[in-house]
Amino acid sequence: MTTFHERVFSGVQPTGNLHLGNYLGAITKFVALQNTHECLYCVVDLHAITVAQDPAVLKSNIREVTAAFIAAGIDPKAHIVFNQSQVAEHAELAWIFNCVARMGWLNRMTQFKEKAGKDRENASVGLYAYPTLMAADILIYRATHVPVGEDQKQHLELARDIAQKFNNDFAQSIANCGFGEAFFPQPEPLIQGPATRVMSLRDGSKKMSKSDPSDYSRLNLSDDADAIAQKIRKAKTDPEALPSELEGLASRPEADNLVGIYAALADKTKEDVLREFGGAQFSGFKAALVDLAVVKLGPIGAEMKRIQTDHAYIDAVLKDGADRARIIAAENMRAVKDILGFVR
């Protein structure tokens, strides 16, 4: 059995207007993983262009995500922070994976169907092949662990299938090249804690999203204390008091969402929160949530804004990260070419 060096990879799309869902669903997990794993955190700008982008806005959004990483506590010196397009091996391995993956596998990807909508014939090939690039993002570093949200689990399963097929198809060559039984690992999902799926503050049945026309549906990482307080106070609730037991949240999506947000920000379970606030009216609970959110998010937003003004610093962080990432990626790409039988 081949033993792989433990390594975490994850990426965030530079779509702009980062919000609480991005923070709790991904960035906080990235910060915590620094203490236990070797980490690569990538701004996946190649994924962003699967739909039309304004070049100036895209550049700004890449820097915004990088600033958010650093402001939230990711250390770009101890770990690797970079943008995908600076490491060409991502795209190179993605093409090889396009030749390994099967059409039937990609046809089952639900996210393409959701994003392409009814006009699928007009969607880009990139949007369709997005999952093979995501597999390449992970496997070019032979990463063993990937923190994923619910909407990316299917893509990680595909990455595992591609790794397995590559290992099976080229088993003899992999052994001949000295890599034992397998070249690529089977990357494992890292299970997320509470509130990984943060919902809209205006509709507990919908995911918090930057594309929602109402700014009151989300807490942006750039919001100041007044905006945070106003949005939480206006968040949709129901007339009942908070339950004391978890089962009481089952048919109350807005209550469940706010309790989940409090739990994640306080690093507690939902049960802990209900033990503290069960039986309380929402007015009192929201006041406590405002205080907590301002303490937790306010400094991050302020630091993020400060960092964003220093383009030279952000670009230097990304270049340094890309240089370090490329060393790993290039070594693995050379091995893939040897396994495939390319002359280099």
Image: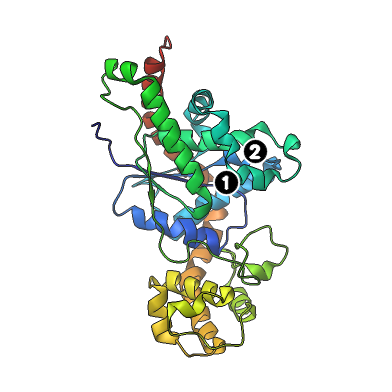
Check the image and tell me how it is coloured: rainbow
Q: Position of residue 141 (x, y in %)?
A: 38, 34
Q: What element carries label 1?
A: helix
Q: Position of residue 80 (x, y in %)?
A: 40, 43
Viewer-proximal residue among 244 and 19: 244
Q: What residue type is labelled 2?
A: Thr
Above-or-below relation of 302 to 61: below
For marks 1 and 2 on the same chain, the one whose residue lies earlier in the sequence: 2
Viewer-proximal residue among 259 and 317: 259
Above-or-below relation of 91 to 236: above
Viewer-proximal residue among 278 and 338: 278
Mark 1 — residue? 62
Give residue 50's mark: 2
Q: Tell me which residue sits at (49%, 90%) in the image.
A: 280
Q: Tell me which residue sits at (47%, 56%) in the image.
A: 26
Pick the quarter of the image with the C terminus: top left
Q: Tell me which residue sits at (48%, 48%) in the image.
A: 153
Q: Quadrant of residue 126?
A: top right
Q: Residue furthest top?
A: 343
